[in-house]
Amino acid sequence: MAEVIPRCLQLSQRVVRILGCNPGPATMQGTNTYLVGTGKKRILIDTGDDGIPEYLDLLKTTLDKLAVSIQEIIVTHWHHDHVGGVDGVCKTFGQKFKTSKVRRESVADAPLKETTYNFVTDRQVFSTEGATLRAYHGPGHSEDHIVLMLEEDGTLFSGDTILGGNTTVIEDLHEYMKTLNNLLSLEPKLIYPGHGHVIEDPSSTIHYYIQHRMDREAQIVQFLRDNADKEHSAMDIVKSVYKGVPENVHFMAAQNVTLHLRKLQKELIAGELVAWSLSSRRSK
């Protein structure tokens, strides 16, 4: 049974977690939003979904109880359950809070109604009383994703790159694997994820994420080697590699296989024609 996440909890001297009150299959018990700092004004990381009055009430109650206010907002990425609440937060408190994120490259970011985005770059630093956050661009889950290192504590806000108690959805596996290895090099002491419980064993968790993907990739490459005389769809690979997996999740499994194949293609290991086959480059 999943660890029950309190609606609001002081995690450390510098961090308060406020649950986004938006539970669901994709959000688990809800989006974790965080107040960071020790002073009268604090940074809010992520804002949950749009149109969640329960979250806005909880945020207001928490700020009143702590006798603090919001200095600015940082969103880890563009997905609705992280950026959706920005307008509601601004409207609730009657302020056009500075809202920072990395700019999307494939399409324009959807405009905000109550404020505007402050687009940031890799390793940008955000400061508030008692806390320094350094942003690291970490694409994979999404192209604009950032993680934030709280430098005073050596703890990491991972957004949806790593979740507490589940694996995450990936947009670009090639980039995602690079991001995971970069996170290892940061050596965080704790991870505060975008969903789920606090991760108290960051190194082993990140290694698990990496190994899980590498094991699946090895199975896919072996299938392609063993069947190099034919072309194969992602679903062909699923039916061979995901033996024992119920058919109702085969479509999702095929999406994961396609992510692996695109990664292999970028690395010149697999090629895409009508379907997929092992590249001759691999055997040379």
Image (cartoon, rainbow, N blue to C red):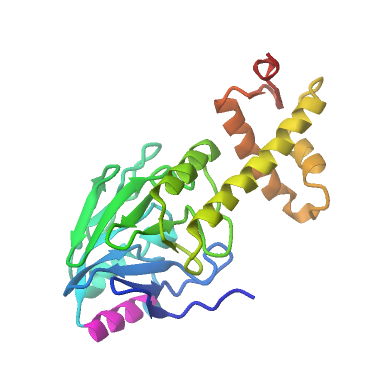
Question: Image check: 231 left or right of 91?
Answer: right
Question: Toward which corner of the image does residue 189 lie, by quadrant?
Answer: bottom left
Question: Image check: 107 left or right of 275?
Answer: left
Magenta span contains residue 281:
no
Q: Nearer the viewer, residue 83 or 264?
A: 264
Question: Image check: 228 left or right of 191?
Answer: right
Q: Nearer the viewer, residue 181 or 107?
A: 181
The answer to whether 47 is drawn above or below residue 3 in the figure is: above
Q: Which residues are magenta?
A: 55-66
- Residue 174, percent across and down? 53, 36
Question: Toward which corner of the image does residue 215 lie, by quadrant?
Answer: top right
Most extreme residue toward the bottom is 65
The answer to whether 59 is drawn above or below residue 223 in the figure is: below
Task: Specify whether residue 116 is in view.
Answer: no
- Residue 119, percent across and down? 25, 46
- Residue 67, percent across and down? 20, 82
x 39%, y 49%: residue: 186
x 79%, y 53%: residue: 245
Magenta span contains residue 57:
yes
Q: Nearer the viewer, residue 153 or 65?
A: 153
x 52%, y 72%: residue: 29
Question: Secondary structure of the magenta portion, mostly?
Answer: helix
x 38%, y 59%: residue: 157
Task: Specify whether residue 85 is in view.
Answer: yes
- Residue 132, percent across and down? 23, 58
Quadrant showing the C terminus: top right
Quadrant showing the N terminus: bottom right
